[in-house]
Image (cartoon, rainbow, N blue to C red):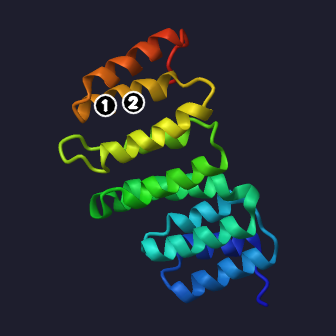
Amino acid sequence: MVMLSRTEIRHIFSESKNFNELFDAFDAALKQGIDDVEIYRVLFWNDSLGSDELILFGEKLARQYRHLAYDVYMWLANIFEVLFGKKDNFELAVSYYQKAAAIKPSEPDPYIDACDCYNPDLDIPPAKMLIEFLKIGYEFVPNNQNLCLRLAVLYHAVGESDLAEYYRVKADESGESPIK
């Protein structure tokens, strides 16, 4: 096993364009027990990696260090939203927001961030899929005013004005100020 310092690993993650070198550094980091998500974020932003490679690294990291899985999935979702969203219609981003929500269902960020992927002109990702995802979050998120507001917008987008109004009223009834 090649022993690399954290500095060497970070440097390889940020500078290398060679997949084998990146994989070896990643493997060394795992075998050395490095569970600092900040080091792996450098790897995830390496622009030489495609979506398949990011999935490989992210899934392996989440399996190895379950306590990092939520952060890994949220980070991957953000990367897929920014870098690959136009190409894959945000499917990867939303799937990783769903994985993050499965780990921490009471956290509002995965639900709200998934809605940020929505393009109403193209209905991408599909509003009905986002609605179903938000309804799951509605059951778990303690301050769900922002989810209600997003549900109202999505129901309006699909032409269900009664449900849109229902969730607007629910948001108003919560009496909490929305998180910006």
User: Is residue 20 shown left or right of residue 104?
Assistant: left
State the image coordinates of residue 119 (x, y, percent, origin top left): 26, 44
Q: Give the CA separation, mark 2 to mark 1.
A: 6 Å
The image quarter in which residue 160 lies: top left
State the image coordinates of residue 172 (x, y, percent, origin top left): 45, 11
Q: Residue at x 39, y 43 (%)?
A: 130
Q: Is residue 90 above or below residue 87?
A: above
Mark 1: few/some/many CA within 10 Å (<14, 14-19, 20+): many
Q: Residue furthest left?
A: 121
Q: Residue at x 46, y 16 (%)?
A: 170
Q: How many marks?
A: 2
State the image coordinates of residue 131 (x, y, percent, origin top left): 39, 39
State the image coordinates of residue 146 (x, y, percent, origin top left): 47, 25
The image quarter in which residue 108 lies: top right
Mark 2: few/some/many CA within 10 Å (<14, 14-19, 20+): many
Q: Nearer the viewer, residue 78 or 164?
A: 164
Which residue in the protein does label 2 denote? 151
Label drawn at residue 155: 1
Label drawn at residue 137: none
Name the amino acid, label 1. Tyr
Q: Nearer the viewer, residue 41 or 86?
A: 86
| Quadrant the N terminus occupies | bottom right
Q: Is residue 41 above or below residue 22?
A: above
Q: Secondary structure at mark 1?
A: helix
Q: Is residue 49 visible?
A: no
Q: Residue at x 79, y 84 (%)?
A: 3
Q: Is residue 26 visible?
A: yes
Is the Cβ of the residue at disc 2 closer than 8 Å to that at disc 1?
Answer: yes
Name the amino acid, label 2. Leu
Q: Secondary structure at mark 2?
A: helix
The image quarter in which residue 141 lies: top right
Q: Residue at x 50, y 19 (%)?
A: 178
